[in-house]
């Protein structure tokens, strides 16, 4: 069979593959400690489920507007104003099948073949693939622990060419958990405005912050940057709604309208009754978000302390999301062989950094229970001690 050429240019998602492998081993009765999944282990809060169930009972089972239920678009615009200082109306918002789909819609709407999209590495693995799928050119800018795995304004400025259309910013970051400070965001915004390019700010982890870290939305820093900003966000991480497939894209009305047209011919509206769950998530108490955040904070500390006690690993302390990103270079192993051996020999699933453009690192998610964290860290320690030069 001759598949389209673009298929050979994309790589299947390694995170999904490893999470699936870990699940399959578990289903076979093998005691696997999995730190692979990028999803909270909590169930969706009851009041959100109840709102969706009520909508289902009330017959909200039909096609809806492609851009989303008007009430939800309004609720999102309100949230963006009050939480993030972004002056959007409903027409600036489209509801999508997850944050992933909001980014994909954006790429289809904005990127022409040959357009360059700047992506700092370590990056969330779907960014470059999405750019490639629409014929764009992902331009990867490597960062390391010396800048906290963050792109500097100088790096960004140097990378921009006449072909640059878009810069992808993700704070708090998957996979590093790093959070850009307000000053750092301000400096990056200035570069975006000076170069007259667009920035998409992926804010899906904005609510998962520690030690007083502050999330600032780049588009809130003035009219010039606001006009060049797209916001991608969703309900998966903050409200533990990964399976619901609910996200959104906000930005200039013309781009949102284009995304809506594209969505109208590809997926149509997001599941109608699920959108009522999202309305409840935004409009009801936010206590559930805070209690999950507190649980993540405790787990982060335990996992970080355990990792820091393992000679041969070096782990930066992140201020957000639910990932740790140890440097494994002292073990002499590259990330794929490290992860394969760890899963095969010690039944611990983690993600190789190469999936995120960083082959000297591995990613561990601590969105899992404390017993698994303790047991998994025991196994990891044994494995690394065996590989570390004494
Ligand atoms: C940085 C980042 N952006 C976007 C997403 C997409 O989330 P979803 O499509 O589940 O809303 C994820 C999920 O892992 C992510 O880590």
Image (tube, grey):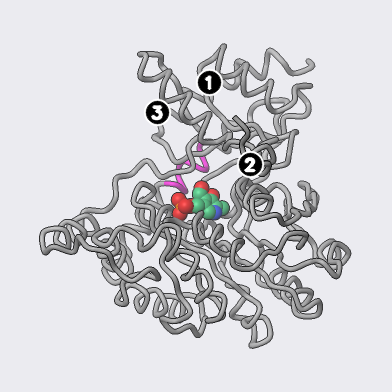
Q: Magenta span covers which residues?
A: 296-302
Q: Residues within 10 Å of mark 2 (few under 14, many from 20)?
A: few
Q: Quadrant of residue 109?
A: bottom right
* Residue 385 is covered by the magenta coloring: no
Residue 321 visible to an observer of this rendering: no
Residue farthest toward the bottom in the current orientation of the protein: 223
Q: Which residue is mark 2?
A: 4
Q: Which residue is mark 3?
A: 371
Question: In this picture, is 51 found above or below 366?
Answer: below
SS at circle 3: helix
Considering the image in quadrants, where does the C terminus appear?
Answer: top right
Give the spatial CA distance, label 1 vs label 3. 11 Å
CB of mark 3 near ligand 1 (< 8 Å): no
Q: Which residue is mark 1?
A: 378
* Residue 300 is covered by the magenta coloring: yes
Question: In this picture, is 376 found above or below 250?
Answer: above
């Amino acid at each position: 069979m001759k598949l389209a050429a673009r298929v050979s240019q994309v790589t299947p998602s390694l995170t999904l593959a490893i999470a699936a492998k870990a699940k399959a081993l578990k289903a076979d009765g093998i005691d696997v400690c999995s730190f692979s999944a990028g999803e909270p282990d909590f169930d969706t809060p009851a009041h959100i489920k109840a709102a969706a169930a009520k909508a289902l009972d009330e017959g909200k089972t039909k096609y809806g507007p492609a851009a989303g239920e008007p009430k939800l678009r309004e609720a999102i615009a309100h949230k963006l104003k009050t939480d993030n200082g972004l002056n959007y109306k409903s027409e600036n918002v489209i509801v999508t099948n997850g944050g992933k789909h909001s980014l994909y819609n954006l790429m289809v709407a904005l990127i022409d073949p040959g357009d360059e999209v700047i992506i700092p590495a370590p990056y969330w693995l779907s960014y470059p693939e999405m750019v490639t799928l629409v014929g764009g050119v992902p331009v990867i800018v490597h960062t390391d622990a010396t800048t906290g795995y963050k792109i500097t304004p100088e790096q960004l400025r140097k990378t921009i060419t006449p072909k640059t259309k878009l810069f992808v910013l993700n704070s708090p970051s998957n996979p590093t958990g790093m959070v850009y400070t307000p000053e750092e965001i301000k400096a990056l915004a200035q570069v975006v405005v000076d170069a007259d390019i667009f920035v998409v700010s992926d804010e899906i982890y904005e609510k998962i912050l520690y030690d007083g870290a502050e999330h600032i939305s780049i588009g809130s820093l003035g009219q010039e940057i606001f006009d060049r900003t797209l916001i991608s966000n969703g309900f998966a991480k903050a409200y533990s709604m990964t399976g619901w497939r609910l996200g959104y894209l906000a930005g200039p009305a013309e781009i949102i309208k284009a995304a809506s047209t594209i969505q109208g011919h590809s997926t149509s509206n997001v599941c109608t009754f699920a959108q009522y769950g999202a309305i409840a998530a935004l409009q009801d108490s936010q206590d559930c978000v805070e209690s999950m955040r507190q649980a993540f904070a405790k787990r982060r500390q335990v996992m970080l302390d355990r990792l820091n006690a393992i000679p041969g690993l070096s782990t930066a302390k992140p201020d957000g999301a639910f990932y740790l990103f140890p440097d494994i270079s002292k073990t002499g192993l590259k990330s794929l062989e490290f992860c394969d051996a760890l899963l095969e020999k010690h039944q611990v699933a983690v993600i190789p950094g190469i999936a995120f453009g960083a082959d000297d690192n591995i990613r561990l998610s601590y969105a899992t229970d404390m017993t698994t964290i303790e047991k998994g860290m025991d196994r990891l320690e044994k494995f690394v001690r065996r590989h570390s030069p004494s």
